[in-house]
């Protein structure tokens, strides 16, 4: 069964990749998603980023389900 994941990018990643992507792959956890994204969007290998699932910063072992709100967050600065 094919799974769909909606991924939203922020900051510089939105400019360099897209505002959001719909991935048609089966991903079990954040680690698998990071590997998939870095393979398909090599710029992610050179920019540190965090992954938030449902507005919570996630660790590599956190599971991903099709209804999750996935956000890719680059470093932010400002005052």
Image (tube, rainbow, N blue to C red):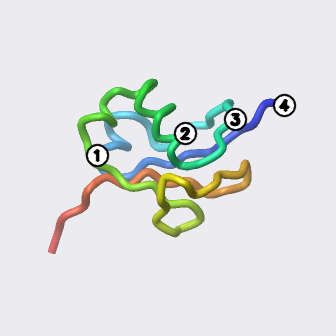
Left or right side of 3 for 62: left
Name the residue located 68 percent from the left edge and 30 percent from the top edge: 24
- Residue placed farthest to the front in the image? 61
**Disc 3 from disc 2: Cα separation:** 9 Å
The correct choice, above or below, for 54 with respect to 18 in the image is: below
Mark seen at residue 32: 2
Name the residue located 55 percent from the left edge and 54 percent from the top edge: 61
Q: Which residue matches tag 3?
A: 26
Mark 2 neighbour density, 10 Å: few (under 14) some (14–19) many (20 or more):
some
Q: Earlier in the sequence, mark 4 or mark 1?
A: 4
- Give 13 or 3, whichever is nearer the viewer: 3
**Mark 3 and mark 4 residues within 8 Å of each other at the beta carbon:** yes
Mark 3 neighbour density, 10 Å: few (under 14) some (14–19) many (20 or more):
some
Q: Earlier in the sequence, mark 3 or mark 4?
A: 4
**Disc 2 from disc 4: Cα separation:** 17 Å
Mark seen at residue 1: 4
Q: Which residue matches tag 1?
A: 12
Quarter where residue 17 is shown: top left
Quarter where residue 40 is shown: top left
Please state the horizontal and vertical placement of residue 30, each as a whole percent of the image.
Answer: 53, 49
Name the residue located 66 percent from the left edge and 44 percent from the top edge: 28
Please state the horizontal and vertical placement of residue 36, each as a whole percent of the image.
Answer: 51, 31
Tell which tag, 1 or 3, sits nearer the viewer.
3
**Mark 4 and mark 1 residues within 8 Å of each other at the beta carbon:** no
Helix, strand or loop status at disc 2 = helix
**Disc 3 from disc 4: Cα separation:** 8 Å
**Disc 4 from disc 1: Cα separation:** 33 Å
Q: Earlier in the sequence, mark 2 or mark 1?
A: 1
Q: Earlier in the sequence, mark 2 or mark 4?
A: 4
Helix, strand or loop status at disc 4 = loop
Tell which tag, 2 or 4, sits nearer the viewer.
2
């Amino acid at each position: 069964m094919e799974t769909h994941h909606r991924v939203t990018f922020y900051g510089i990643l939105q400019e360099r990749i897209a505002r959001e992507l719909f991935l048609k792959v089966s991903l079990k956890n954040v680690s698998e998603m990071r590997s998939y994204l870095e393979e398909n969007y090599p710029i992610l290998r050179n920019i540190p980023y965090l992954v938030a699932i449902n507005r919570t910063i996630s660790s590599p072992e956190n599971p991903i389900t099709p209804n999750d709100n996935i956000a890719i967050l680059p470093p932010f600065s400002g005052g």
